[in-house]
Image (cartoon, helix red, strand yellow):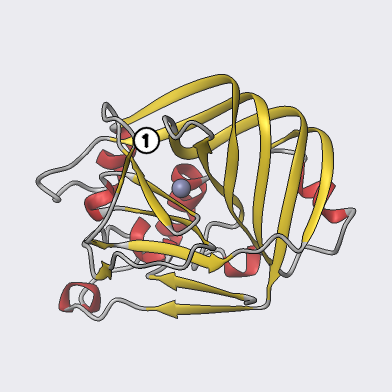
Amino acid sequence: MSKITQYSTIGALMSGHFSGDFPLNSNHSPTLFGLGCSCGISGELTVCGGEFWEATAGEKLHKLTDCRLPFLQVTEFVAENEFEAKGINEANLDQHLSQQLAIANIFLAVNVKSCFDKVVIRRPQRDETQTRSVEEMADAQQVDTLTTISGQLIGFWTPELFGRISVPGFHFHFLSEDRRYSGHVLSFKTAEATVAYQVKTSIEIHNPTSAAFGDLNIDVTKLDELIGNVEK
Ligand SMILES: [Zn+2]
């Protein structure tokens, strides 16, 4: 399937709409793939093989079932296009992909598997009160630098044009092979990796329907700054 399904938008999330409007049920396709966050941005979610992994600062990596989510971006991923890449990092992966196809205006689901030299990941603190601001959430995060670690990057490439719907450029979450580490990827480096991707020609967005979302004040100028600072 060439479609990305998305619950809410990065713009609504970064405008402070963290409440769990979308139910996460327990049965998922074994090829479901993607990322998101849990209620109140208490954890970064990585979706792999139909399983939802929640990474929260100071907690063991665990599976999430039966809850409600504020933001989710998923697709059915089957690696149709794959290549071996040498010397890749967060800054040059777009150039490697550009040698395969013109990526400036299209969506891709991207999966990078490797034994990474280095991956820097970030996880938020759990927020029981569910009342904090985007800035408070962004300040309360744990950053870990993992070295010589096997795993995969799971995520999407979004064209600049769609930068208020989804994080423009790459948005990756990491999942270690031993399922001990996960989180939002700040940077990575590897000598050799298998890069699999799928072109996604359509995106389906489920907008929240709550009254709180209806009343949400979205300042797009501030929003563009926040997406650049917090998500990239
Ligand atoms: Zn993320």
Task: Answer with left or right where residue 142 lies relative to residue 186.
Answer: left
Q: Position of residue 96 (x, y in %)?
A: 83, 46
Give neighbour class at mark 1: few <14, some 14-19, many 20+ (Cα, 10 Å). many
- 46 relative to 122, above or below: below
Outermost residue, left side: 129
**Who's the residue at 58% across and 69% down the image?**
162
Q: Position of residue 129 (x, y in %)?
A: 9, 46
The quadrant the N terminus occupies is: bottom right
**Who's the residue at 79% across and 53% down the image?**
82
> Disc 1 designates what residue?
123
Q: Position of residue 143 (x, y in %)?
A: 42, 26
The quadrant the C terminus occupies is: top right
- 98 relative to 9, above or below: above
Outermost residue, top side: 147
Query: Amino acid type of disc 1?
Result: Arg
Name the foreground residue: 178 vs 104.
Answer: 178
Task: Answer with left or right where residue 71 lies relative to residue 159.
Answer: left
- 229 relative to 59, above or below: below
SS of the residue under disc 1: strand
Name the foreground residue: 50 vs 58.
Answer: 50
Q: Position of residue 134 (x, y in %)?
A: 29, 48
- Can you tell me whether the CB of the residue at mark 1 lies under 8 Å from the nearest atom of ligand 1? no
Count of numbered labels shown in the rendering:
1
The quadrant holding residue 142 is top left
**Who's the residue at 19% across and 77% down the image?**
210
**Who's the residue at 28% across and 49% down the image?**
41
Task: Answer with left or right where residue 99 lies relative to residue 167.
Answer: right
